[in-house]
Amino acid sequence: MSIKHKLSKLTYGITAAAVITGGLASADAVAAEKVRWQVPLAFPSHLVGLTTPVKHLTENLKNISGGDIQLRYYEPGELVPPFEIMDAVGSGKYPAGYTWVGYDQGTIASLPLYSGAPFNMEPPAYLAWYYEGDGRELLEEIYAERNIHPMLCSIIGPEGAGWFAQPIEGMDDFDGLKIRFAGIGGKVLEKLGASVTMVPGGEIYQALERKTIDATEFSQPAIDKMLGLDQIIKNYIMPGWHQTLTTSHLLVNKDTWDKLEPQTRALIEMGCESATLKGFAESEWAQPTALRDYEKEGVSAQTLPEPVLRELQKVTNEVLDEIAAKDEMFKRVLTSQREFMEHHSIWHSKGYLPRDFYQYD
C-alpha cells in the first residue's frame, strides 16, 4: 500500500471519527436537561458585592450551558418577603433563593456563624475554613434537615459598625440606644443595654427618617451609600467588629438539587464559586471610593478606640459561649471556627505585612 493511500485511509478514519463524535456531542447538547428557576432575592440586586454576584451567576450559567441553565432572579418582595426565603425554598414553593442566611438565626442558631460573626475570620481565612475545612460540610448538614442544599455564592469584607448620632467613646454609649443591628452583634449590644431590632435593608432609611431607630448598621460603605444612610446621619463608626465578613448563599430545594444531572450540579457549584470571587473583587474595588466620597461630603468616619473593641470582644465571647451551651450545632461550628483561627493565626500574624504599611494620605 502506498504512503499516499495509507494517508488517505487515515484521513478518512479521522474524518469519520470526528463526524461520529460531533454527532454524539450534538445529541448530548440536544439531550441536556433544562433548568428554569425562579430565584427570590433577600436584597436589591444592585448592591455591590452583596447581591451583584447573582447577576454574574445567572449570566455565566446561561452562557456556559448554551442557554440550558437559566435562573431568573426577583427583587425582594416580588415573590416572597426576604425573611421567608428559606421556608419557601425548603417547602419547594420556589426551587432556589439567594439570601443572607443570618436572617434565619431565630430558627437556626448556627447560621450567623456563616453569615458574618463578631471578631471572626477575615475573608481569606474564612474561605480556607469553608472550602478546605469543616465549613461546607457542616452547613450542608445544617440545611439537610430543612430540605435545602446551600452554596456559598458571595463574600465581602468587613462592614461598617454603623451610623450613630453621637460618637462612641465607651461601652456606656450603647446603653439605651434603639438600634437596627443584625446577627450575633445584636445580641452583644442587647447585653450592653441597647434595644435591638431587625429591619430589612430596604426599610432602614425610613426607620431612621421617622426616628423609630436611633442608629443602624447595614453593610459596607459603598452599600450604605446606595441606601442613602449618610443623608440622615453624618457619624459613621468603623470597623465592623460585629461582622468581619458578609456572605450570601444560593439555597436550592434539596429534592430539586438531587434530581439534577451531575454535570448540571457541577456547573452551578462552579458558577457560585466564580460569583464569590467576582463579588469580593467588586466589593474591594468599591469601598475606598465610597469612604473618600464620604470625607468630601462631611461624613465623619470614626474608628472605635481599641479599649472599646477589646471590651466588645470580651462580651462577644460571653454571648457566643452562652449560645453554644444551648445549641449543639452552634457549638460544633463555633469550635471548628475557633480551632481553625488558632491554627491559622501563625500565618495571619507573621505572613502578612502590618496594616500600617499601606500608606493612607
Image (cartoon, rainbow, N blue to C red):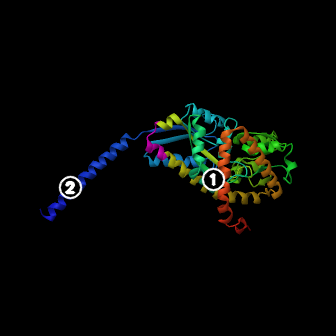
Whether residue 260 appears in magenta in the rendering, the answer is yes
Q: Is 168 placed above or below 326 here?
A: below
Residue found at x 70% / y 40%: 200
Query: Count of labels shown?
Result: 2
- Secondary structure beneath label 1: helix
Q: CA separation, marks 1 and 2?
A: 55 Å
Q: Quick check: can you spot residue 178?
A: no
Q: What residue type is labelled 1?
A: Tyr
Of badges 1 and 2, the one in the foreground is 1
Which image quadrant for residue 323?
top right
Figure check: 301 above or below 28: below
Of label 1 and label 2, which has the lower sequence position? 2
Residue beneath disc 2: 12
Depth check: give the residue in front, 128 or 220: 128
Q: In this picture, which residue range is highlighted in magenta?
A: 259-267
Q: Give the percent coordinates (x, y) of residue 319.
A: 77, 44
The quarter of the picture where the C terminus appears is bottom right
The reply to whether the magenta stretch includes residue 104 is no
Quarter that holds the N terminus: bottom left
10 Å crowding of disc 1: few (<14), some (14-19), many (20+): many
Viewer can see residue 330: yes
Instruction: Name the amino acid type tagged 2.
Output: Tyr
Judging depth in this view, the residue of 238 and 349 nearest the camera is: 349
Image coordinates of residue 271 in percent, x first then y, are: 51, 48
Q: Residue 126 carries which label?
A: 1
Contact between labelled residues 2 and 1, with CB atoms less than 8 Å apart: no
The secondary structure that dominates the magenta segment is: helix
> Image point 57% across, 54% down: which residue?
277
Place of residue 97 in the rendered image (x, y in percent of width and height, measured from the top left): 58, 39
